[in-house]
Amino acid sequence: MQRGRVILVLAALAATGSLTLPFFSAATLGTVSGATAHATLPVLALACAAAVVLAGDRRESLVGLPAIATAAAVTLAVLLTGSLLIDAELATRDAAALGSRGSFGSGLWLLTGATVLGVTGLIWAMSRRLS
């Protein structure tokens, strides 16, 4: 299997693993998990991208409709992960306004890394020179 496809599958697995970890914690709010933070949406987007590359053709690189579907799923994952990062930053500011300290959890960082890995895998999978 091409390296870019393997990277996309690994990104989906890492994103799935992030759901069990805390995404945000503050004394005033408690700990927020991935399921509570609606992190299942970017995880599903990366899982769809992994399903497309696993079920698609076995050419040297992604082309045609599988490339478009994978790019759309990874782009959606990037947008949704970005919205989670913005929400966590706003929650940190709200906690600070209440006199507490909020912090990003390891699950959010793992999801962000998995999303960046998904973008890397997409670029690698669509390039003939990197395969």
Image (spheres, helix red, strand yellow):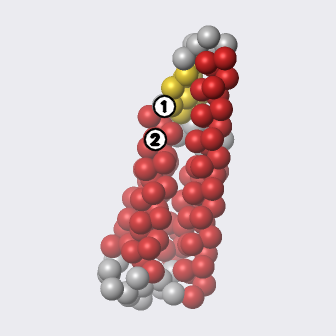
Which part of the image, by quadrant, shows the C terminus?
Answer: bottom left
Q: Is residue 40 visible?
A: no
Residue 103 horizontal side relative to residue 29, left or right: left
Distance in Å between CA atoms under marks 1 and 2: 7 Å
Q: Which mark is residue 105?
A: 1
Q: Is residue 102 above or below residue 109?
A: above
Q: Position of residue 102 (x, y in %)?
A: 55, 22
Which residue: 51% across, 31% down?
104
Which residue: 48% across, 37% down?
107
Q: Amino acid at mark 2?
A: Trp
Q: Position of residue 2 (x, y in %)?
A: 34, 77
Q: Which mark is residue 52?
A: none
Q: Is residue 129 above or below residue 125?
A: below
Q: Residue furthest top?
A: 99
Q: Amino acid at mark 1?
A: Gly
Q: Position of residue 73 (x, y in %)?
A: 60, 66
Secondary structure beneath label 1: loop
Which residue: 60% across, 26% down?
92
Q: Is residue 13 visible?
A: yes
For disc 2, the marked residue is 109
The answer to which of 124 and 86 lies nearer the viewer is 86
Q: Position of residue 7 (x, y in %)?
A: 38, 65
Secondary structure beneath label 2: helix
Q: Is residue 86 above or below residue 8?
A: above
Q: Residues within 10 Å of mark 1 (few under 14, many from 20)?
A: some
Which residue: 56% across, 80% down?
66
Q: Mark 1 touching mark 2, by CB under 8 A?
A: yes
Which part of the image, by quadrant, shows the N terminus?
Answer: bottom left
